[in-house]
Image (tube, coloured by chain):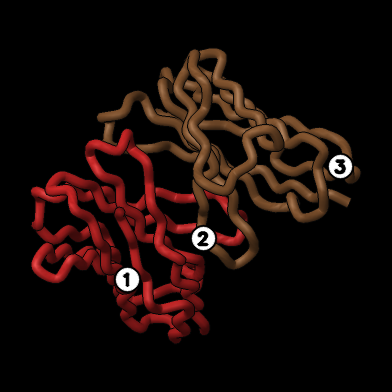
C-alpha cells in the first residue's frame, strides 16, 4: 500500500527566510507520480508540481525548488526567501501509475510566514 | 485549461435533509472523477472514485447509501449527502481526470457543507 508522510505539522518562519518542507513516501510500484499542492485559507487546492518516478532531476521554479531522491524515498520542497503570501497548508501526494490516478495525500504541513 | 467547478461553494442544511453537490469539468472530458472529504486541519480523504457510466467505487468505511455518487456524463458528477447529520459537516472536494493513465487530477474549489 502507498503512504505519504509529512512529519512537520506546522512550521513558522520570518519573512525572507528559506524553508524546506519534508515528504517521505512508500510505494511498491516502480512507476509513480509525486505531487505538491498548496491549500490557502480559501480551501482551493493549488497544483505546484508533478514529478514522475523516472525523473530525478531537481526542479526550480522561481522561489520554489524540489529535491527528489529515490534512494531515500523523499520529495522535499524548498521555498526561498519566503513571503507572507506563502502562508498555507502544503500537501505532498503520491499516485501509482497503475492506480488510475488515485492520490494518497500526506497529512500536510501548515506554513506560517510572519513579518 | 483543465478547469473543474463545484456548485454550490457552500451550503447550510438542516439535519435530516439531503443535499446535492455538483462537480463539472468545464473544458475536458472527465472519464474519472474523485470525491474527497476534508475535516478542519486534516488531510484530504478519498471517499469514492467514479467512472462515467458505471457505479462508483467507495473507499472502505464510506457509506454508499449515505453518499450517493452519480457520474452520468463525461463532464458532470454529483454527490448527494442523504439524511445529513451534523457530523457530515465538512469540506467536500471533487477532482477529475481525463483517463486512468493521464497522470493527473484537476481539483474543484470545494464545497463547504454545514448541517445544523
Marks 1 and 2: which is nearer the front?
2
Tell me the tag on residue B13: 3
Q: Are marks 1 and 2 on the same chain?
A: no
What chain is colored red?
A
Relative placement, left or right, of B93 versus A96 is right
Establish if B31 lies above or below B39: above
Q: CA distance from mark 1 to mark 3?
A: 40 Å
Could you tell me which chain the residue with mark 1 belongs to?
A
Query: Can see residue B7?
Result: no
- Label 3 Cα crowd, 10 Å radius (few <14 / some 14-19 / many 20+): some
SS category of the residue bearing label 1: strand
Disc on the earlier residue, 3 or 2: 3
SS category of the residue bearing label 3: strand
Q: Colour of chain B?
A: brown
Q: Are marks 1 and 3 on the same chain?
A: no
Could you say where residue A73 lies in the image, as x and y percent from the top left?
18, 66
Q: Which residue is mark 1?
A: A79
Q: CA distance from mark 1 to mark 2?
A: 21 Å
Could you say where residue A79 lies in the image, as x and y percent from the top left?
32, 71
Could you say where residue B35 lies in the image, as x and y percent from the top left?
54, 39
Q: Which residue is mark 2?
A: B43
Seen at 89% across and 45% down, the residue is: B15
Q: Are marks 3 and 2 on the same chain?
A: yes
Seen at 80% across and 42% down, the residue is: B84
Marks 1 and 3: which is nearer the front?
3
> Looking at this view, is B66 or A18 the one in front?
B66
Establish if A89 lies above or below A45: below
Seen at 30% across and 76% down, the residue is: A20
Amino acid at each position: 500500500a502507498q503512504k505519504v508522510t509529512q512529519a512537520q505539522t506546522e512550521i513558522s518562519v520570518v519573512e525572507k527566510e528559506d524553508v524546506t518542507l519534508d515528504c517521505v513516501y512508500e510505494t511498491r510500484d516502480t512507476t509513480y507520480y509525486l505531487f505538491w499542492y498548496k491549500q490557502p485559507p480559501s480551501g482551493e487546492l493549488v497544483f505546484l508540481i508533478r514529478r514522475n518516478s523516472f525523473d530525478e532531476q531537481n526542479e526550480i521554479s522561481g522561489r520554489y525548488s524540489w529535491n527528489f531522491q529515490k534512494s531515500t524515498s523523499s520529495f522535499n520542497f524548498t521555498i526561498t526567501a519566503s513571503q507572507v503570501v506563502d502562508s498555507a497548508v502544503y500537501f505532498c501526494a503520491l499516485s501509482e501509475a497503475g492506480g488510475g490516478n488515485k492520490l494518497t495525500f500526506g497529512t500536510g504541513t501548515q506554513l506560517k510566514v510572519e513579518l | 485549461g483543465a478547469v473543474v467547478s463545484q456548485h454550490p461553494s457552500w451550503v447550510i442544511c438542516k439535519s435530516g435533509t439531503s443535499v446535492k453537490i455538483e462537480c463539472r469539468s468545464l473544458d475536458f472530458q472527465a472519464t474519472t472523477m474523485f470525491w474527497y472529504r476534508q475535516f478542519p486541519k486534516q488531510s484530504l480523504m478519498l471517499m469514492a472514485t467514479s467512472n462515467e457510466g458505471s457505479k462508483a467505487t467507495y473507499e472502505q468505511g464510506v457509506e454508499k447509501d449515505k453518499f450517493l455518487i452519480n457520474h452520468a456524463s463525461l463532464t458532470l458528477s454529483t454527490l448527494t449527502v442523504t439524511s445529513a447529520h451534523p457530523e457530515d459537516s465538512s469540506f467536500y472536494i471533487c477532482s477529475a481526470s481525463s483517463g486512468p493513465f493521464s497522470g493527473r487530477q484537476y481539483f474543484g474549489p470545494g464545497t463547504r457543507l454545514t448541517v445544523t
